[in-house]
Amino acid sequence: MTPARFTEITSRYASLRLALVGDFCLDRYLEIDPARAETSIETGLPVHNVVRVRSQPGGAGTILNNLSALGVGVIHPVGFCGEDGEGYELQRALALVPGVQGNLLVTPLRRTFTYCKPLVVAPGRPPVELNRLDNKNWTPTPALIEGMMVSALEVRARELEAVVVLDQVDVPETGVVTQRVLSALGELRRQRPELPIVGDSRCGLRGWPPIIFKMNAAELSALTGLPADAGLRQINEAALALAKQNGSEVFITLSERGILGAAPNGEVEHVPCHPLRGPLDIVGAGDSVTANLTVALAAGATLREAIELANAAASIVIHQLGTTGTASVTQIRELLVP
């Protein structure tokens, strides 16, 4: 990518209006000082002394952080949180993110999705994450909340340049992206076929409307029946067939092999990953790819250009240790543009 083309694409980011639909959660980091280790008098078990607590938006909030780091002009979050302390922290964290307009639905019918991450932080050493403590919803999302999510999306539909959708829950129908919400997204796709709508789900994209699919190799295998050890040629063919079937682009993240993208017109592009530059923390890399693909496509990037930008962002994020990182336009430029 030439410097002029990079500037042409990224200079449009500030004028974009995006909606981010999905499961927002709170990433709460508990930093533990191993030098202050104790043993409980009552139980005889080790005590981890927390010396710092920091919180940031996670799940769909990680994509939001990446969109903001790229300088996107307006980001409308479409999601919910509970009437609890974690919800308060999440709302407060979202309010500090530049570009965010609007708030999550706050409801007593749901708990705030929370990832609590204890980290052992020792001087001169990379942080070590202990067993995570999660707080999730295990019952179906009430119809009332589904209706409010659909309404929030419909209110913004005409003014948007792109939509990102993230399904982060483990049990279907317990989060934001229910079948009813997917139906609304499918209708938006029919009404505005030119609008980039990028979907990502940890449960896989089977049954989703024909929007832009972003997935990893394992998810592609589960969706298409492709062997888990498939080579690039097989992945190429499967992604292209899926793109033609959906009439939308398909992007496959391939870990150390980079990112592959296919378009309905038969175009296929593969960009290898950047060389590793030290210790890695892969948390958040996939979300940075989703954010960068969406913004690049909304700004008029070609298939290959979008992949190049997303690939560079992921390389930056995986080298940020002990946090769910982001990549700015400046950082991406330094890595990508000669």
Image (tube, rainbow, N blue to C red):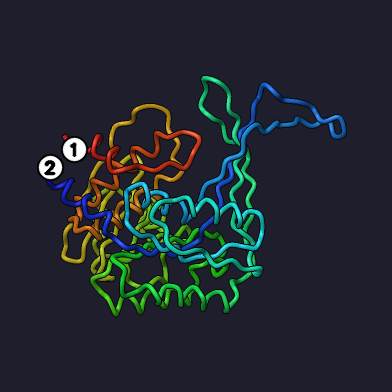
Neighbours of disc 1 within 10 Å: few (<14), some (14-19), many (20+): some
Q: Which residue is at the front of the view, 180 or 51?
A: 51
**Tag count:** 2
Neighbours of disc 2 within 10 Å: few (<14), some (14-19), many (20+): few
Residue 238 in view of the camera: no
Pick whichever of labels 1 and 2 is earlier in the sequence: 2
Query: Residue 30's image quarter?
Result: top right
- Alpha-carbon span between mark 1 and mark 2: 6 Å
For mark 1, give the secondary structure.
loop
**Residue 337, label in figure:** 1
Q: Which residue is mark 2?
A: 2
Q: Residue at x 47, y 63 (%)?
A: 22
Q: Are marks 1 and 2 in contact (CB under 8 Å)?
A: yes
Query: Residue 206's image quarter?
Result: bottom left
Which amino acid, mark 1?
Answer: Val
How far from the left and from the top, in percent, is residue 148?
51, 76
How far from the left and from the top, in percent, is residue 270?
22, 48
Image height of 36 relative to 113, above or below: above
